């Protein structure tokens, strides 16, 4: 993992860029709604909103490419190392494993290792930042609505309280729309964190099973004579 730390950091940075854009998009939407009644003032917020959406899409696409390539390289290296170890191990050590167990180490466990190493860590970081940022911005927009969201997470209740605050003049319609966008987004970071922790646990268990093969005694390949050398050394009839 250490040689690929820079790639993982790049994936985290790209994910944080996409998360930051996602957090800024509802505020840009609020800005668009606030300028609807102002002649000639709509072009700038609309342009910024479109630019944010484009940057977020590019960031997430680049993150998917970087992490996807990293994941496949991890699987390739892990499977290559395991296969070489199995071919060079003593036959007695190989027979100690159950039928199909070595195949599982090379196939299923390496895939779980890929998910834990390449995506889970990045998702945990990005999901945490997204969750905290969403809650903070919701608190900045309207604290009573945030209390309602955290207490019930019911969109009907939020709409009811929000409509009442709009009718009483305590809340702007644009603020309510931006708040609802954040409320709909708060579920995704929680789901992402749950999936990431589950994948991380599965990957750690797979890594532990793969480490069980490290005790295999390997043949000394330097003491074996290549067949080609023997063929060249043998006299021709």
Image (spheres, rainbow, N blue to C red):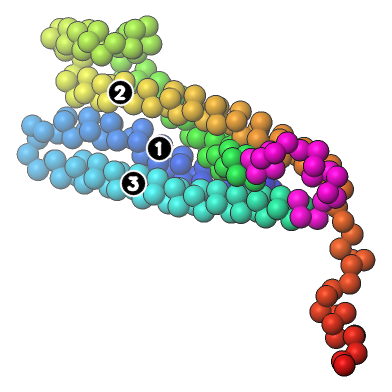
Q: Residue at x 59, y 40 (%)?
A: 108
Left or right: 129 in relation to 172? right
The earlier-in-sequence mark between 2 and 1 is 1
Q: Secondary structure at mark 2?
A: helix
Tell me the CA gap for discs 2 and 1.
16 Å
Tell me the CA gap for discs 3 and 2.
19 Å
Magenta span contains residue 87: yes
Q: Is residue 67 visible?
A: yes
The earlier-in-sequence mark between 1 and 3 is 1
Q: Residue at x 80, y 42 (%)?
A: 95
- The reply to whether dot 2 and dot 1 touch (C-beta < 8 Å) is no
- The reply to whether dot 3 and dot 2 touch (C-beta < 8 Å) is no
Tell me the CA gap for discs 1 and 3.
12 Å
Residue designated by label 2? 184
Q: Residue at x 46, y 39 (%)?
A: 16
**How many numbered dots are placed on residues in this image?**
3
Q: In the image shown, does 233 or 222 lie closer to the viewer? A: 233
| Picture quadrant of residue 34 | top left
Left or right: 196 in relation to 103? left
């Amino acid at each position: 993992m250490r040689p690929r730390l820079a790639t993982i950091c790049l994936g985290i940075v790209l994910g944080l860029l996409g998360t930051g854009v996602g957090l800024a998009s509802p505020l840009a939407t609020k800005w668009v709604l606030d300028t609807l009644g102002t002649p000639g003032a709509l072009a700038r917020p609309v342009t910024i909103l479109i630019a944010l959406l484009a940057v977020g899409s590019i960031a997430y696409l680049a993150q998917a490419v970087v992490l996807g390539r990293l994941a496949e390289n991890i699987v390739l290296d892990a499977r290559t190392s395991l296969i070489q170890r199995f071919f060079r191990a003593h036959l007695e050590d190989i027979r100690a494993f159950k039928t199909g167990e070595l195949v599982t180490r090379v196939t299923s466990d390496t895939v779980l290792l890929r998910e834990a190493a390449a995506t889970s860590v990045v998702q945990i970081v990005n999901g945490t930042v997204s969750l905290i940022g969403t809650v903070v911005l919701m608190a900045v927009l309207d604290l009573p609505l945030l209390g309602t969201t955290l207490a019930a997470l019911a969109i009907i209740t939020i709409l009811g309280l929000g409509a009442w605050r709009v009718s009483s003049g305590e809340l702007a319609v644009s603020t309510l729309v931006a708040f609802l966008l954040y409320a709909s987004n708060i579920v995704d970071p929680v789901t992402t964190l749950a999936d990431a922790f589950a994948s991380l646990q599965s990957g750690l268990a797979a890594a532990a099973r793969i480490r069980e093969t490290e005790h295999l005694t390997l043949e000394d390949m330097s003491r074996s004579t290549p067949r080609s050398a023997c063929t060249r050394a043998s006299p021709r009839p």
